[in-house]
Every structure is written in structure tokens, then in C-alpha cells.
Amino acid sequence: MTTLLLFRHGRTEANAAGLLAGWTPGVGLDETGRAQVAATASRLSAVPLAAVVTSPLQRCQESVQAIASGRAGLEVHTDDRLGECRYGDWTGQQLKTLAKDPMWKVVQQHPSAAVFPGPEGEGLAQTSARAVAAVREWNARLGPEATWLACTHGDVIKAVLADALGMHLDMFQRLMVEPASLSVIVYTPTRPFVLRTNDIGGDLSGLAPHKKGRRKRRRASADGAVGGGDSYHASA
């Protein structure tokens, strides 16, 4: 089973100001964002990572520096498919202004049909397709025993979570993904299991594999636990 940790970058000045940054260059973390990613790095210290894969945008590149710091040999890769949705002419505008645009209702109620205006605008369905493809390819590349982290953006994470949950993209606005939050998905041969969403402060030590000799590891199962179960990786 491959375990994916989806990490949204820390807060930026654009986030704080209510601006839709998109692919605007030079948008880095603000003071709060740097503190957020430092706290997340501390929480992740007990979790061995096979790799870190990040969006090319500055706010994600800065965020993974804290995660990778002190982890000798940890490979950090950049994958454009994990980049933010290309919001076209909406890029750089105030969210409160965009909320008055007729397209806003489409984005909120029927996002699978939303294509952002302008020559560089992208459809949310396209964003979802490229991000899900990237995740599946990295899962295959890293292997079934890997735990890896993808640092990306709110709409991208919501799209990947929606896919894992078997939700239509039109429902992905029901998901919340805050800055510096972690969401966790385990991929089995037959289905994904969503372990956490929008986690901004929980203990992560349970994501580390059990040490040999400390506890006998039970057989991993792709079956859903009837009655709830006591562990995502255990079978009855």
C-alpha cells in the first residue's frame, strides 16, 4: 500500500490579502506561513518519507525546504502537474471581486464545467486530471511500501481527495483544505482509503511503519473494515 501525504503550502501574503495568486511568480510564504511549515516539519519528523514531490511555484518550493531539511538522502522532485490551477484572467484578482462574476457560481456549483477565462485559463477538470495522473504515476514509481509527500495547492488537493473518495468533481467544494494542512490517502491495489483531511495539528506518529520486533505487523488489506476496525492497515 502506498501512502500519500498531501501537504498544502503555508500561508502567503496573497492568502492573507484575499488574492487569487494562481501562477503569479514570486509569491512566497509570509511570517505565519513559515511558522506553519516549521510546525508541520516537526510533526512529520517521525514519519520516514521515500520522496517529496512539489509544485514548481515558489510557495510550495519554500514549504518543502522545511520538510526536507535534516533528512539526509531525501529526494525532492518538482512536477508541473502538481502546480496550481491556471486561473487565466482571474489571476491576481481579489476573491471578493471575483465572487460577483457569473463564472463564480459555476465554480461553486458545477466546477467540472468551469473553464477559467483568458488564453491561459484552464478547466478545473483539466487540473484534476493532470494531478490525479501525477499521483498515480508517482505511486507506481515509488512502490507499494512507500510513504511520500506531495506539496501542492488547495484546489489540486481537493481534486485528488475527491478522486480518492469516489466523489464527482462537482462535490469537491465540500472539502476544506487550509494552508499547511495535511491530508492522507492510502492506495491499495483495489481502492484508496482516505485517512485524514485538512489535518492542521494532529499527531502523525501513527503513519510511521511499525519497527520490526516491536510489534508483529498484520497483513495489509484492501477490504473496508466492517464495524470500523482498529487500524487502516490491519485485516481481521
Image (cartoon, grey):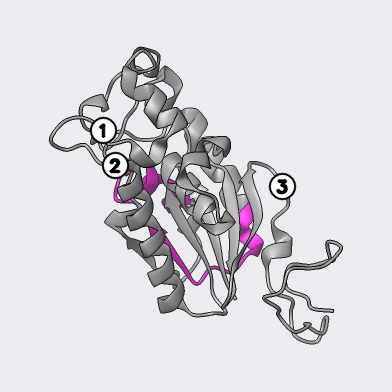
The answer to whether marks 3 and 2 mark residues whose Cβ atoms lie closer than 8 Å is no
Dot 3 crowding, Cα within 10 Å, few <14, some 14–19, many 20+: few
Give the extent of the magenta segment. 43-66
Dot 2 crowding, Cα within 10 Å, few <14, some 14–19, many 20+: many
Which residue is more in the foreground, 209 or 235?
235
The mark that comes first in sequence, 1 or 3, is: 1
The answer to whether marks 2 and 1 mark residues whose Cβ atoms lie closer than 8 Å is yes
Residue 7 in percent (x, y) is at 51, 50
Q: Quadrant of the C terminus?
A: bottom right
Q: Amino acid at mark 1?
A: Phe
Residue 123: give its label.
2
Residue 63: give its label.
none
Residue 202: give its label.
3
Q: Amino acid at mark 3?
A: Gly
Q: Secondary structure at mark 3?
A: loop
Where on the picture, by quarter, is residue 3?
bottom right
Q: Amino acid at mark 2?
A: Gly
**Residue 101 higher or lower than 3, as above or below:** above
Q: Is residue 8 visible?
A: no
Residue 116: give its label.
1
Q: CA distance from mark 1 to mark 3?
A: 35 Å
**Residue 104 higher or lower than 116, as above or below:** above
Q: CA distance from mark 3 to mark 2?
A: 33 Å
Q: CA distance from mark 2 to mark 1?
A: 6 Å
**Residue 107 higher or lower than 130, as above or below:** above
